Image (cartoon, helix red, strand yellow):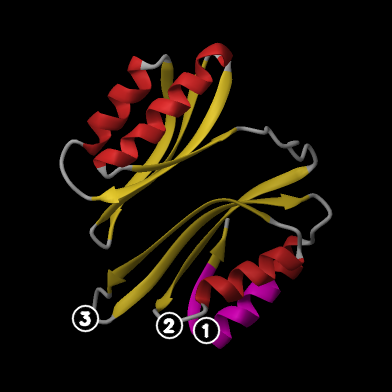
Amino acid sequence: MTSLVLTIIARDKPGLVEQLSLTIANNGGNWLESSMSRLAGKFAGILIVSVAEEQADILLDALRKLESQGLKVVAERSQESETLTDSNNITLELIGHDKPGIVREISQALSRYNINVERLSTELVSGSMSAEELFKADADLTVPAGVDLDDLQQSLEAIANDLMVDITLN
């Protein structure tokens, strides 16, 4: 079996998931994992499909043909990376007033510690006591075992103070 990682984007309309799932199923694929959302009038997503090696090219060709129907699909064969055996998994939660640069500042700090972002979800939410938009982020992180979590926390708190956001590590 081969795993394919697909990214998709299309103008949002009913039936897109059905169209994609039928193409995958009719060409020997098995839908494994996905994350999809409507963003700014577009439907976008990422998913993992498994398929028998001898069917992979047929499925890839069928997915390319969906572009004529307005569904752009980018497909890559999965190259499983080495899993860090000596690491810690933590979550990061952030909330604060929206402003440009929040993701850039946090991701730069995480990169300095060689921390891998496994999952990142962000959204704008309405403040509970005001109508102001708040930026909210949740991330699953893989931290190398040698990283001092207290030092990481202090670094992120310094950034949080500059950005005027709250950051919690769990």
User: In front: mark 2 or mark 3?
Assistant: 2
Residue 77 on the magenta segment = no
Distance CA(mark 2)–CA(mark 1): 8 Å
Which amino acid type is marked by label 3?
Ala
**Label 3 element class:** loop
Q: Is residue 3 left or right of residue 15?
A: right
User: Does label 3 or label 1 sit earlier along the sequence?
Assistant: 3
User: Does label 2 or label 3 sit earlier along the sequence?
Assistant: 2
> Which numbered circle lies on residue 131?
3
> In the rendered image of this protein, does residue 68 appear above or below residue 114?
above
Q: Quadrant of the C terminus?
A: bottom right
Q: Residue at x 61, y 80 (%)?
A: 159
Q: Tally the numbered discs.
A: 3
Q: Quadrant of the N terminus?
A: top right
**Label 2 element class:** loop
User: Does label 2 or label 1 sit earlier along the sequence?
Assistant: 2
Q: Is residue 16 left or right of residue 169?
A: left
Can residue 16 be seen here? The reply is yes
Distance CA(mark 2)–CA(mark 3): 15 Å
Q: Are marks 2 and 1 in contact (CB under 8 Å)?
A: yes
Residue 156 on the magenta segment = yes
Q: Residue at x 47, y 28 (%)?
A: 60
Instruction: Magenta stretch: give its range.
Output: 154-167
Mark 1, residue position: 163
The residue lying furthest to the right in this view is: 146
> In the rendered image of this protein, does residue 77 appear above or below residue 25?
below
Q: Main secondary structure of the magenta part?
A: helix
Which amino acid type is marked by label 1?
Leu
Mark 2, residue position: 99
